[in-house]
Amino acid sequence: MKKQLLVFSLLLLLTVPATYTLFTLGGFTSHDLVHHVVRQISMDRLLSEGQFPPRWSGDLNNGYGYPVFLFNYPLPAMVGEVFHKFGLGFVDSVKAVLFLSMTISAVGMYLFLNSLLNSRLAAFLGAMFYVYAPLRFLNVYVSAAVGSALALGLVPYVFWSLVEVYRGKKWAVLFGSLGFAGLILAHNVTALIFTPVILAFAVILIWRSKERVWLFRQLVVMFLLGLGLSAWFWMPAVLEKGYTRYDLIFGNFYQDQFVSLGQLLRSPWGYGLSHPQNPEAGDMSYQLGLVQILAMVLLVPVVWIFRKKAQIKTWGIFALVAFITSVFLMLKVSQPLWKSLPFLSLVQFPLRFQAVSVFAASLAAALLTKHLPFRKIVFVILLSLVIYANRNHWHINEEFSPGEDYFLNLKTTSTSYGEHLPKWGAVANSKSPGKFQYVSGQGWVNIRVDKSNYVLAQVGANASSKLVLNQYYFPGWDIEVDGQKVKFDYLTDTKSYGLPVFDLQAGSHIIKAKFKNTLIRNIADFISLIVLAGCVTMILWMLFPFKKFLVKK
């Protein structure tokens, strides 16, 4: 235990250079930090209003509403909310999640590799290779991609759980299901990218196991529990995506984002956007990492030389195949495959497959340390190289600290293109005048309750009128007048396009507008609740074996 604590302390100490810039006061210029701060503020409001699961924000899109957490991964903002409740501001809460993503990834990769290879030294180096990779600093300091950063922090725990299930640890099935669910909730695209790699790793474990049927059943349970725990998010996100503009915007987005082999080997470090086929000055870097590539190159002869050793042969080939496949999917030569497999378009940026390359290189570095002679020398050389090679990457570009009020007043969609707006909606360029507004006729409106998913108002119409609910219609919105559900039209004309319009008779009325669950959302929520109850029961059973109370003395 003392040795493990010492190792964890050293791991965290060596992540300090990679994360210390995050402790700079205020925000920093990046691709997405502003978006994530806006989502963090939105998460805080939705939870304070009692909306759980949080899905619809009535504030965003200039007050016309946006299904922000119906389609955008919610876990980073949920974790950020914990930091916010402990007193951090919204900007610092988002930065705290970025910091957490780096530290937990170091610990997680160490746990995974130590369990797989039974070598602290090898596991330590692999963990450092996983932290000190250009992609990790790109996610944190250039893009501020909180979702993918947190997801990469959770990936090693899924693999660790697989190994521990293979070793017969009872708790690992449940822990792995939590890790897999967390991966989906942290960043669904990273989950999509890594799921084939996770399944391939699981198949190899089953093939190596003496209890193949038992292990197969355990891993099936683990994955099903993970899918069930996260069903409340991924089921509506998948099955209701057709209502949105997403495919219209991102259907062929990937075609201009393929990188070249030369760019993976070397490209200048910048903080701009991604234009790999038409580079511009200051663009972000696409480099994979020369030391990571070196580890993969060295692994080839090592696998051949030590091919009689099952461990190096099995996991070395696994790492090489994962690395080569991920590199292939980033190059334009793979475009026919992207066209034939429609789900790949969800990845948007082929460069995101570099996450698999970095994971494979971390495994390769650990294998080299475990099996090469003079392992301590190999460890020192590779550790020094990987930290030195990334010395210019762990910095922000410029400080950006306009104050919390600046972010509180932002009412954007929290996405670059408003891609999750309904097909019949559009990004609102002007602020909403209020939740209810007269389209024809005259009268007054008194808002009594104004929440994102529930609006209660007392209105008085001087004559027969038409009112509009200034929230873009999305399946789930219902409107009641004096307790009676009313019909509305949201495709009346260009002026009210996408906003529910309904008739109102003369007189005083009580109007309620609610954003309810659809059948799909209800089913998804029910699945997650049932699975959660089952997991809690399993935890209690492991902690407090009730069988002893059933045995007669």
Image: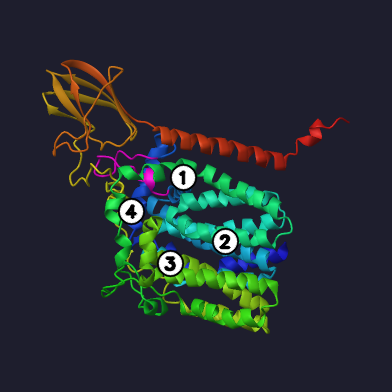
Q: Tell me if 335 is positioned left or right of 433 in this view.
A: right
Label 3 sits on residue: 21
Q: x%, y% of residue 406?
A: 28, 51
Q: Tell me if 98 is positioned left or right of 404 in this view.
A: right
Measure the alpha-carbon separation of dots 2 and 4: 35 Å
Report the amino acid beneath label 1.
Lys
Magenta highlight range: 55-73
4 or 1: mark nearer the eye: 4
Q: Residue furthest right?
A: 553
Q: Is residue 265 visible?
A: yes
2 or 4: mark nearer the eye: 2
Q: Residue at x 33, y 49 (%)?
A: 38
Measure the alpha-carbon separation of dots 1 and 2: 40 Å
Earlier in the chain: of badge 1 and badge 2, it is: 1
Measure the alpha-carbon separation of dots 3 and 2: 37 Å
The disc placed on residue 200 is 2
Report the amino acid beneath label 2.
Ala
